[in-house]
Image: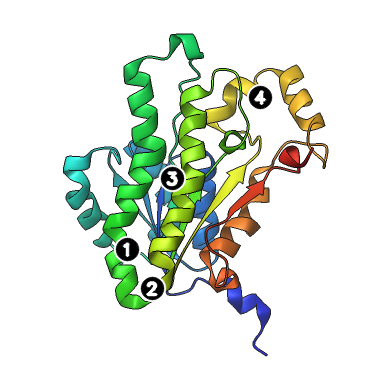
Amino acid sequence: MADPRSLFDLSGKVACVTGASSGLGQRAAVALAAAGARVVGVARRADKLDALRADLGDRLAPVAADITDHAGMASLVDQINAPFGAPDIVVHAAGLNTRQAADDVTAEGWDQTLATNLSAPFFLSQALVPAMKEKGWGRIVNFASLQTTRAFPGGIAYGATKAGVGQLTRAMAEAWSPHGITANAIGPGFFPTELTAAVFDDSDRAARNAAQTCIGRNGRMEDMDGPLLFLCSDASAYVTGQVLMVDGGFTAK
């Protein structure tokens, strides 16, 4: 039997991470690079990507781009492929939550949320899958949410897209797993990121959220490393179409 630790080794693999400029996307880029992958980090904020590259060195190639621009998708894929070749792994960590109450949702906010959280993961994956098919190996990791199955105040647009991510993940698995490409999603609980700043800025609210988990605390960034590497590596070769909740048991209570 081979060393089980080798199942998580990503040496020789190329990963593309969207939303790599901050939060869980940035953490994903760091974890994948530490596991041996060469990483293309995609985000709109070039300065944040440059700072990440300063930390990771030549293991990371920054690509500043808008993933919701359908007209620019072909160009984006060219930029992603240029540094290290076509990705074996794509992690869709970019996200938008307008936090608009149902009565206040605007068409613009709705469309932006849908474009970022649901449309971009599909169309970017669709564009990267042909190269994965040629290799007979690929990993797609979407980001779901507590709101994939729970309704939160001010989350009707965000929650609708994250529920969609759950079904998108299953449909991707049905379409592409026969070609050696697994598609799974991670559903984070409450982690301290830019997207959840409003939650963690309210200490009472953060404490209530922690109390609703089985473990009794909110997420720490390092809690994401193991689940992500599992879904991006050979360790999860027979796992596809699943949503793995990394939430301390929030959804179990």
Q: Are marks 2 and 1 in contact (CB under 8 Å)?
A: yes
Is 125 placed left or right of 205 in the picture?
left
Q: CA distance from mark 2 to mark 3?
A: 27 Å
Q: Nearer the viewer, mark 2 or mark 3?
A: 2
Mark 1 Cα within 10 Å, few/some/many (few <14, many 20+)?
many
Q: In the image, what residue occupies the spot 78% across and 24% down? A: 208
Identify which amino acid the numbered label 1 is placed on. Val
Q: Nearer the viewer, mark 1 or mark 3?
A: 1
Q: CA distance from mark 4 to mark 1?
A: 37 Å
Identify which amino acid the numbered label 4 is placed on. Phe
Q: Could you tell which of marks 2 and 3 lies nearer the N-terminus? A: 3
Identify which amino acid the numbered label 3 is placed on. Ala
Judge by depth and name the residue closer to the eye, 40 or 67: 67
Q: Position of residue 231 (x, y in %)?
A: 56, 62
Q: Nearer the viewer, mark 2 or mark 4?
A: 2
Identify residue for label 4: 200
Q: Position of residue 181 (x, y in %)?
A: 42, 68
Identify residue for label 3: 20
- Looking at the rendered image, the quarter that the N terminus falls into is bottom right
- Looking at the rendered image, the quarter that the C terminus falls into is top right
Identify residue for label 2: 179
Is 31 placed left or right of 42 in the picture?
right
Identify residue for label 1: 129
Identify which amino acid the numbered label 2 is placed on. His
Q: Could you tell which of marks 2 and 1 lies nearer the N-terminus? A: 1
